[in-house]
Amino acid sequence: MDSTHVTALSSLLQGIRNDSSMLQRFIYSHDLSTPPKFIMKFIKNIPDIVVQPESVEDVLKILEVAKQNRIPITPRGAATSAYGGAIPLKAGIVIDFSRMNRFEVDEDAKLLKAEAGAVWWDIQKELVKRGLSLRVYPTSAPSSTVGGWIAAGGYGIGSLKYGGIADNVASLTIADFLGVKMVDEGLNRFVGLCGSTGLILNARIKLRDFSEDKPYAEHMSIGDAVKAIKSIKDDDHPAHSALFINSSFLSMKNQVKGTDLPEKDTLLLCNGKESNSLGEELWEDRFYPMRIKRLGPSLVTFEALIPLDNVPGFYREAKKIAGSRHGFEIWFSKDWASVLLFMPSDERTMAYSLHWLKVLKLLRLARKLGGKEYSYGLWLSHRSRYREDFPELYEYKREIDPHNLLNPGKFFPEGVVPRLMNLAELMAAR
Amino acid sequence: MKGNVKVEQEALICAQCHYCRVCPVYSIVGWESVSPRGRTFLLKSKALGEFQFNERGVEEFYKCTTCGACEVVCQTSIPLIDLWEESRAELVRSRLAPLPVHERLKQAVEKYWNPYGERVEERDSWMPESIEFTEEGELLYFAGCTASYRMKELAVATVNVLSKTTEFVYAGQSEVCCGSPFLRTGQKDIARKLFLKNYQEWERRGVKRIVTTCAGCYRTIARDYPKLAAEEGLNFNFEVIHTVHFVNELIEKGELSLKPLDLKATYHDPCHLGRHMGVYDEPRELIKRLGVELVEMERSRENAFCCGAGGGVKSQFKELAMEIGITRIQEAQRMADVLISCCPFCKLHLAQASRESSAGVKVLDLVELLERAVE
């Protein structure tokens, strides 16, 4: 879009906070991921304008302008995912939801009603004052938003007892080109779809009574960790979170923090037994998995959901693919384990692209062992077709967004990126 | 920034996690161009040849009080305060900065040895005639520019306390700006010149220990001067302490006794004393020794919200600084009618913010309370 059109777009959006300066557009063109440079040549990731709605009316006006002028929209929370969900594919409008951040609590019903831009940890701090707590929250809770996590989907802290974010959303208020609707059934049409089927305005989320966290850590192998998890899966067990951290990750943490953590495979359980000092130290650090990026300076991350029984097998094979310099964090949920692998790298070198190929190889391994993608975003949209409900979702998308303006390229494959990623995956398989 | 390994490396290390959204400027402005992660993204992009700073970019880059709130929460432990200062110095070297007002501060200090553009002859006009000080000796009181010209009552209060317990040196009109505003805004050359002038003066007078009431001067002399000295091939053998250290020491030795004050107050951690120098407990100890009922604000100690004045923001972006100051004053207002701080610049700005917002919060420096309590 040339500058005349950008100015025209800015005037169409008059009354809504917006900025079409190159500086702001450049800054709002990325998320946590740093893909190899050649991939970015196929993406128009610099938006034409960034807007910050403050009300539902603002969002509806943006949707109307987008529809009338066939301009793509990219919703954005805190952009703390690394799947490209908040990266524009075809420029257009980036909607930064950070100013829609109000929330209220129904203490009797133990339900939170939060706008899309509310930050998880801000909410939790308020809930604790009222004797309540989130049932699940992401490991990026200090900055990530309600709308952002729901749009990305996935699991987090608390998922051992309460499942993923999808299991904890009671209802969503969605805005699309037809208007605003409240949805409390068929949430699979929205959770994890990056706003490609409608913009999340607010969510009602299930809460629990607050209880002090009592983290307990014990050294054990991944096999024993899985056995331990399977033995505590009944709903009455007080444990809400379980995290396996492997020895090499602890070693890297020691390197960057100057700490003296025992460099042994460790299972951290929250609210199972009484707390111990190692447990408390690791629990305190739960929001800081990327500390080791200092060893990069870049970090390539892999994440997938693996069925519990296959976690030890996956872990064994994945370590071989990852090579010597890696760290695993495995968050357990009810039936799945969210396996995170961190590989320090340097985006200025050729080795960086090879690390990305390793990620694709690991994804194939995950699939082979009954696993699935943690999230899709832009980078893994080519894999959404493996989902059983893909035909239904695709049909819905066509119905409500015939011109593919709602976050194009996210979840639903579009353009060159999915083809490139498919090709790269085939290369990686060799 | 090409060629500067540290800036490039640290910018690349940034995880873009946005935990630094605690930034006071970002919390007011709301656009990521002023957020710490926005700035590291620009630095990284510049280093990789994907971005060039223009006038707007430089201006946004300077909307930072260098308070260090970002550094506390940084996931990858980036020394962000140093990163901002080094990046600004690089912008100055590239002739893209300083900003106009910061340039004028430099012109003022070149002419008058203080950034306020006040006459040198006025620098010691606050000193009460009744106070005796020496020309030479081991302990020096460094008043700083804000207390000398704008918050004279703090300088008076400090010497009133000092003179009751010890002999001290005061350099009077030979004292010059410590250079803090220039180090924070990337103008290292003039800061070096100021350092040398103060250094030579202290050496000449046989000074061994320097006490200052200003948190900004304290940070600069204790943390920046040793580096500047090393760069100049000089030994820096001065012990630098803040008034709170000195007074606590006197009380512990039994050389100073205080009568209790009947007061309820909250405490604002100055960024230069707290996050920059790690001094959190000593002011609180002193406040309690004064018999003051201390009630903490929700954001305190290393998480304290900046007053909004530092890093050249008050001089260049007055409205922004005031909005931040009012936010802090309103936070204090929820806790007490009196706000205590340990920095003349914080006092100056927060008192203005209290008046501007009609908050009715009385802002006092700890040394003023101390003056009242000394028996």
Image: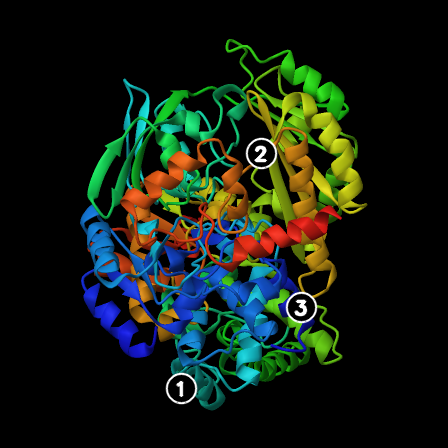
Whether pointer 3 and pointer 1 mark residues with C-beta atoms closer than 8 Å, the reply is no
Residue annotated with mark 2: A372
What chain does badge 1 belong to? B
* Separation (CA) of disc 3 from disc 2: 40 Å
- Return the chain for callout 3: B
**Could you say where residue B180 lies in the image, as x and y percent from the top left?**
52, 72
Quadrant assignment for the N terminus of chain A: bottom left
Query: Residue at the location (40% across, 86% down)?
Result: B119
Specify how the rendered protein is coloured.
rainbow
Q: Name the residue under label 3.
A: B6
In x, y percent, where is residue A417? 53, 57
Q: Which image quadrant is residue B347 in?
A: bottom left
The residue most toward the bottom is B111
Three-letter code, disc 2: Lys
In the depicted view, which residue is nearer to us: A105 or B241? A105
Of badges 1 and 2, nearer the viewer stands: 2
Please, is residue B43 above or below residue A398 in the view? below
Secondary structure under the numbered disc 3 in the rendered image: helix
Depth check: give the residue in front, A356 or B189: A356
Q: Name the residue under label 1.
A: B119
